[in-house]
Image (cartoon, coloured by chain):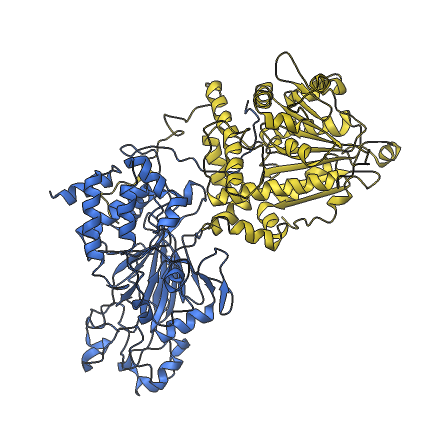
Amino acid sequence: MASHIPNLNTLRRGRGRGRGIGRTEETLPSGKDRIVQGTDNDASVSRLSAVELGYLEDAYAAVLTPAGSATRRLPIINRGTYARTTAIDQLVARFLGPYLPENTHKKQIISLGAGSDTRVFRLLSSRQTPDFVYHELDFAVNTAEKIRAIRSAPVLQRALGIGSELSSENDTRVTVSETGDALRSPSYHVHPVDLRSLSTCSDPVAALPGVETGLPTLLISECCLVYLSPIEAEQVVSFFTQRLFGHGGAVSGLGDSLQEAQVNVAPLGLILYEPIRPNDAFGRTMVSNLAARGIQLKTLPRYASLEAQRGRFQEQGFGDGQAVADIEFIWKRWVNEDEKERVAGLEMLDELEEWQLLARHYCIAWGWRDQDDTAFAGWKDLEAQQGE
Amino acid sequence: MSDLDRAIEQLRACRLIPESQVRELCYKARELLIEEGNVVSVDAPVTICGDIHGQFHDLMELFRVGGDVPDTNYLFMGDFVDRGFYSLESFLLLLCLKVRYPDRITLIRGNHESRQITTVYGFYDECIRKYGSANVWRYCCEVFDYLALGAIVLGASSELEPTSTTALSSMPIDDSELETEVLNSRGEVTMSTYRARQRSSSDASTDSRNISPPRDISAAPGQAAAPSRSGAPGTGASGDGNGSAVTSRTGAVLCVHGGLSPLIDSVDKIRLIDRKQEVPHEGAMCDLLWSDPDEIEGWGLSPRGAGFLFGGDIVKQFNHLNGLSLVARAHQLVMEGYKEMFDGGIVTVWSAPNYCYRCGNVAAILELGEDTSGGGTVARSNGEYGRSNGIVSNSRVVSPGRRYRVFEAAAQDTRGMPAKKPVADYFLVSFFPLLS
């Protein structure tokens, strides 16, 4: 062993990472906000990268990505963005069902921490007359940003039905609050709200104006609840399952007789996209790398495995179905061979082992409650992953 | 101090050298590499290293753990660049060392030493960012085209000298020799394996060539005994007094970045490739840099889109036909740093710890010791010796003793080193403010 070469590992500093971006959350909240902004850009930049390289079709990705931040992501990240996006698209499509002009049965989607997500615009433009209502919930700073983007991008306005030949009638159908952080329209609502405040609000319906409590409803959390403490995350979920949409499913602590007594409870589903498996070598590194950026995945230790995710749905009000699959499984089993070949042909992927590692550490979980067993029937033949 | 030594000093400190000096360095390196065959012959002892991928600080850790150049003889199996943030510093340092100590360091080509791959995986962007133009990238790519495609290690010892710190619990069994040893970065032995020592021919009452070898480990024909572990090189017990056809009983080790090719059934066929070009999308040269071993029979399609998968039967046959005891290759991330497959017929060596600052893996290097028993004569093991002998078809050359040194990622914020904190990519999509 060459003794004159310094052992970098013994020169490691005692505490933390020293100067630079190794901030502490207590002292520098503004620094933390900047980190969050970076995360925000991270996601939209990844989406735009996947779109520009042909992984995904998304006419709205460019206008919802900060100008000048377009960057080509590595193939492994592009494939992950592809697998995640198409998997959630598929769950959403199966929930909404095929578009039928005569269909008068509306459905509802509520996206938690939606940020600059493009899904609502893609859905609106793919269906002639919207047969759904879409709600996005996020902090006011983020919803204001999104509404600014809508105001400055005609392509987003067209998706919302605000055409270039808009009649005054159409104009009034889309309203933005004076503060610029709330938007209402017949099929799209943007709510500036701190999710954690929901559990203490006195009037659930008033907290989210425009939400119809009788409609079959799908909640989506793409890496959102994972940042809350386990208790807060559970409270957010129970706000929807128990308060806004009434009781349903196997709520822990409630007896069977009470469940039987419940009638006319709206069908409710939840899709989660989150990191998983924090306890192996890759997972530990992921947790510490993100912690170094000020990002804490607070529910990850509690929902660390596929099994824990299934149990979470069972316990938190989605008693009629619980399923989960990691992203590697989804890539292997949900993407058909032709499509796999197309996607694999877009870029040479020389990171197979790394792809497997990364993809095994993210999962999509979905579950539902539905007395009539119809609203989520389309989810039943989706292949889920067994085991831990 | 020569300019070259100064450049080495500078690069060791993770500081770049001027563009004009890079051009000169690359020119000298090409002149040197053009003289090398497609398959370089390297004599043991040698330390074999896998992917580096621009993880400069970890390369320094590798040298600390494995010994410095020129004290230690190194063989790097490619993928010097891309992914990490210091591809330039890493590759230029290795190139300087190559030019300064051409006989002490061997560089062979990985699939990332390619124009096309480096434009996707970061090296091109790094060159533009650090030098302001693509000139340095072009100089480096011209060097890539001249890198050898493989190496043959000759004269490796079948037996390891036990590390002095060997734990008492792993004392050798009687009449066995130390075959593999795994050490951590502090030089402590964490695992040892032994195999039955082969009887020396002087102990045998009859001609050893007529005796079935114990445990299927046999000597090559005409070859004599294994050395006594404590015996001095060339002592009578080694039985090399009969002169002429004395060979090392350890077969040669083929080193390539990726693996085998269905178009290549002998090492000599590798020598026939016209290698001085960009890595092609298919064909023998592509396969050597892209293929992977897999638990299959025969050949399979590679999910990477280039090269092939090959099974244990392919490795066994290739090693046998070419008098090889081992194929050493890199190319695939293995969490433990190294992975032996197919009864030790092939090993993957991976030398980029915490790959991409994200994977949480350890790294390893493989040391092969020098066989001091054969009087300095080693087998030419690329298919040209004694295959017609009936005994050979039943026998197997002995694999070399293998010492793996496992090490972890270097700290990034050490004083005296640039401390750019790498940011690993994850799939993050939340726009949710991270308030406490």
Outermost residue toward the front in this view: A165
Say whether residue A277 is visible: no
In this rendered view, identify the residue nearer to me: A51 or A22: A51
- The quarter holding residue B348 reads bottom left
Left or right for A295, reference B259 = right
In this rendered view, identify the residue nearer to me: A81 or A323: A81
Say whether residue B411 is visible: yes
Q: In this view, does B425 lie above or below A174?
A: below
Tally of marks: 0
Q: Where is residue A69 in the image (x, y as percent from the top left)?
A: 46, 30
Q: Position of residue A248 (x, y in %)?
A: 80, 33
Determine the colour of chain A: yellow
Residue at the image point whose x is 40% and y is 81% from the top = B394
In this rendered view, identify the residue nearer to me: A68 or B40: A68
Residue at the image point whose x is 34% and y is 39% from the top = B126
Left or right for A82, reference A316 = left
Outermost residue toward the left in this view: B1
Q: Is residue B432 above or below residue B388?
A: above
Left or right for A343, reference B263 = right
Q: Which chain is blue?
A: B
- The quarter holding residue A104 reads top right
Q: Where is residue A92 in the image (x, y as percent from the top left)?
A: 69, 38
Quarter of the image with the N terminus of chain B in it: top left
Q: Is residue A31 above or below residue B249?
A: above
Quarter of the image with the C terminus of chain B in it: top right
Q: Where is residue B2 in the image (x, y as percent from the top left)?
A: 11, 44
